[in-house]
Amino acid sequence: MNYSIHIDEIHIEGNTFRFVVTGVFDIVSSLAKPKVIMHFSNGIEDRRIPLVFATLNRNEDEGVIEITSNYVYLLDRLFWKSRNCGNDITMCFNLLYGECYEEKIEVDMTPALLEQDKLCYVCRLEGKAIRFIHQPDFVQRLAKYERGQSNKVKTAVGKVYSWVVFACSLCLLPWMALDALLATFHFIKYPGKVGKADASRLRKFWGHINVRLSSLSGHKISVRKAKAFYRKCKCGYIRASFNRTKKKCAVEDYRISFISLRRTDISGNFAFVYEKMKDNPNLEIEMYLDPKDIADMSKKEMDRFAYLCATSKVVVLDEFTPYIHYFDIRPETRVVQLWHACGAFKTFGFTRLGKPKGSPQKTRNHRNYDYVTVSTKNVKICHSEGFGIPTDHVVPTGIPRTDVFFDEAYKANMQKSLYEQYPQLKEKKVILYAPTFRGDVKETAYYPMEKFRVDEFMDAVGDEYFLIIKHHPFVTEKHPVPEKYRNRVLDLSEQTELNDLMFITDIIITDYSSLVFEASLLDIPMLFYTFDLRNYIETRDFYFDFESFVPGHFFFTQKMLEKAIVEKDFAQEKVSDFAQRFFDDFDGKSTDRVVELLYQALSE
């Protein structure tokens, strides 16, 4: 594949730099688009950041894609543990496109010596890398610091004055309420726009008060803002609780705390690891398992959460845990993320820089992980980029909960249990339909039920098949199942672990769910019903080219999906290669490797 990257300009100003970059790439897929990754290093840790495209033009006639980028990056936010070390920073471009991955690609840069930053760095091309050469200037740095302190004082004074004015304005609320009441019943005119024309009288009443209040103080009365303020206060409290505990209590050298905001019991990866460690008399194992938002946590719960984070030698997580990122974790504490997903599929975190729901450059989220466990060395760069952490913080131990796929006794017991519970499955070939959700977050999650019509599907595939429907836990709506198919269709969305169902499954239909990794360990044929693939790539995207990534055929219509099942066209030969790509070990000992990593963290 041919490609080139040309740097037109680099502007360095203070602690920010802006690239104006153009690139040209041969088209390798009608669906994929190139991913350019900037790989930084300061000699202590590295950081991978995606190049945010300003434009991407696909020229099918000439067979090339042209990209441009014009995005501001923050030099002082590149690194987490060593961001104030003052070292030189080197950066090179890497490319991931289709099956092609290229490190340190050739760069055309004009001019060779770029603008000097007035405060911090000189930038120049050295071979395939660009070096930001640290140029300390203490006089200018002191002046900058003093300006910053002065601005902080001005900002603080402005905020205090603003809230004093708001408090004084509240004294006029009785007058504002009378004024709003008169306007609501048309005795006087509304003071400008107070809401939609068809809004209720109550909404217009509060809108009128807010217009008056805003004109006096610059603030409004808002339930949403009140909730946000309340949540912010709770964040401040939990941070203060952590800091108080740090001052009073030392780290307990043998305390390991398992913290989860997604489960109420010891399950998933936690269960496997806990079983291996619970009998060690030298360990003090603590659990915090409570899927609550911080706004719903009691003072006692917040204090306990902060206490465990402040006094544990090792803190073990199983997914994104926002509250822990409010803390300046002690240097002697190790934070280990037992990430729940195998492989690397949909983009997340800092990989989504500049996109909806992506992590902004300034956020602390994810960045204080000392170790993240993954299923293979082949996805280290994906998780390093997504979490905004050094590549060597990502450790390919394997995923503990996948050990059951190599346990023949567990498999036999699970099959027996499921057949006893659902005896109608015994004489049928089981199709497991397990799509992921649409929408950005849990509160807005849904699945377009009309896209998969159960009656048409069951008519097409014939009597030899039984269908199990398993929606993502975020999806609350159920698929309508016609009465005539109740003996051949089960919706188990609210019951039974997804992984356990795979032990009795003959065919899987999914779309963008990460269950493909676990299914590959059982060599189950997979079909991908991706009616919205192009839109999904544009809005969410994947780490790898979907067309060459998935271990099976993908379809845009239900008719094409049904035809593949009838003709038994599964492309199952892709499944084994897929498993080899996304798992390093097939020995059922991932839990042992994770436990070894935790003992290593305890001894550091």
Image: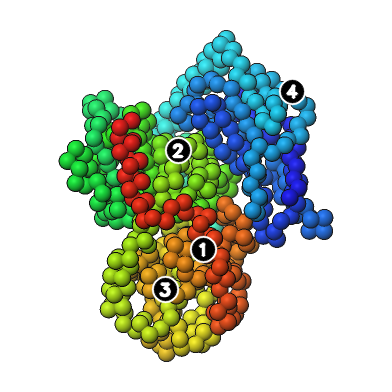
- Dot 1 amino acid type: Ser
Characterize the local packing of mark 1: few (<14), some (14-19) or many (20 or more) Cα atoms within 10 angstroms.
some
Q: Which mark is residue 48?
A: none
Where is mark 3, residue-wise?
505
Where is mark 1, residue-wise?
576
| Above or below: residue 426 compared with residue 36 | below
- SS at mark 1 in the image: helix
Q: For the residues marked 3 and 4, what is the alpha-carbon distance in whole angstroms?
A: 61 Å
Q: For the residues marked 2 and 4, what is the alpha-carbon distance in whole angstroms?
A: 34 Å
Q: Can residue 451 be seen by looking at this rendering?
A: yes
| Above or below: residue 341 compared with residue 231 | below
Q: Quadrant of residue 415?
A: bottom left
Seen at 61% across and 71% down, the residue is 556
| Above or below: residue 394 compared with residue 112 | below
- SS at mark 2 in the image: helix
Characterize the local packing of mark 3: few (<14), some (14-19) or many (20 or more) Cα atoms within 10 angstroms.
many
Where is mark 4, residue-wise?
113
Where is mark 2, residue-wise?
393
Give whichever of discs 4 and 1 has the lower sequence position. 4
Give whichever of discs 3 and 4 has the lower sequence position. 4
Give whichever of discs 2 and 1 has the lower sequence position. 2
- Dot 4 amino acid type: Leu
Which sits in the foreground, 141 or 30?
30
| Above or below: residue 502 compared with residue 75 | below
Q: For the residues marked 3 and 2, what is the alpha-carbon distance in whole angstroms?
A: 36 Å
- SS at mark 3 in the image: loop
In the picture, the quarter occupied by the C terminus is top left
Characterize the local packing of mark 2: few (<14), some (14-19) or many (20 or more) Cα atoms within 10 angstroms.
some
Give whichever of discs 3 and 2 has the lower sequence position. 2
Seen at 63% across and 47% down, the residue is 101
